[in-house]
Amino acid sequence: MAAHGCLGVTQSVPAPIASSITQRCRGRIMQAALVLCVSLSLAARAGAEDACGGPEVPSSSYNIPAPQMSAEDRLSPHMPEALRCDACHAIAFQLEGRLSRAEAKQGRKELSESDYVEVLEQSCVQDWELYGVQELRGERRLTGPGLPRQEAMSVAMMGGPWPGRLSKMCHGLVGEHGEQRLYRAHRRGHTALRELLCHGEKGPCAHLGASKAGGSAPPKALQNEL
């Protein structure tokens, strides 16, 4: 008789049977070790060398450049000309959203002059911190609520000079068109204010083609957070 342990179980068995059990146990242990080895290899595939002696598995890496900033982008207090159309769309989106929410609080009734003037003013003095600039298909574009979403595997530079420029441009557009005219456009429909601000004869998007300027309808893939 021989005492034999396998996986924590100890029995007294004849020697021939013990030898057979030992071989089976060794096979199970080798199988378990192989499974563990494969699992470790998968978990450490980005490491320099496979811990189980396998070939090195190369890791994937991506070089994602940040948007290139010109001297005007970094230093000017004004919105760069190439980004004024995007900025106008962002401003129109914010004005529309805030006017609509103010009306909803009054049961969709038309706002008084003092109310819509205040809403437009508050729209322009908000912090605008959700806006920045990104590279979109090789071009610098603004990104944020009301604009095309940031592409995957891209870098957006948020904050910085962009909130101040948006606020300054917002005040300029409201002053140029007048609060009453803007509110009347808003009451005509959800695209009328955007058309008035951005796509008029002298609007920021007037000199651009319809595809780049966004046309008369809002872009399909928008960030809709306010």
Image (tube, rainbow, N blue to C red):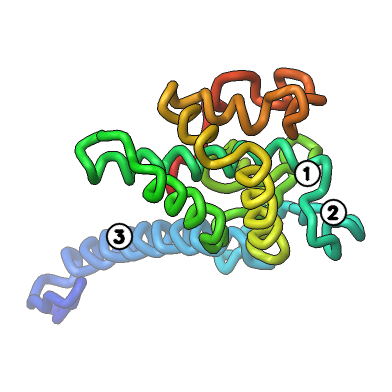
Amino acid of disc 1: Arg
Question: Which of the marked residues, 3 or 2, is nearer the chain's N terminus?
Answer: 3
User: Is any part of residue 179 visible from this angle?
Assistant: yes
Q: Is residue 225 left or right of residue 200?
A: left
Check disc 3 and report the residue beneath it. Answer: 28
In the rendered image, the vertical position of residue 174 relative to residue 203, given as above or below: below
At label 2, the amino acid type is: Gln
User: Circles 1 and 2: CB distance less than 8 Å?
Assistant: yes
Mark earlier in primary sequence (1, 3): 3
User: Disc 1 or disc 3, which is closer to the eye?
Assistant: 1
Reading the image, the residue beneath label 2 is 68
Visible residue check, residue 59: no
Question: What kind of element bears circle 3?
Answer: helix
The residue identified by callout 1 is 140
Q: Nearer the viewer, residue 152 or 209?
A: 209
Q: Is residue 52 above or below residue 137?
A: below
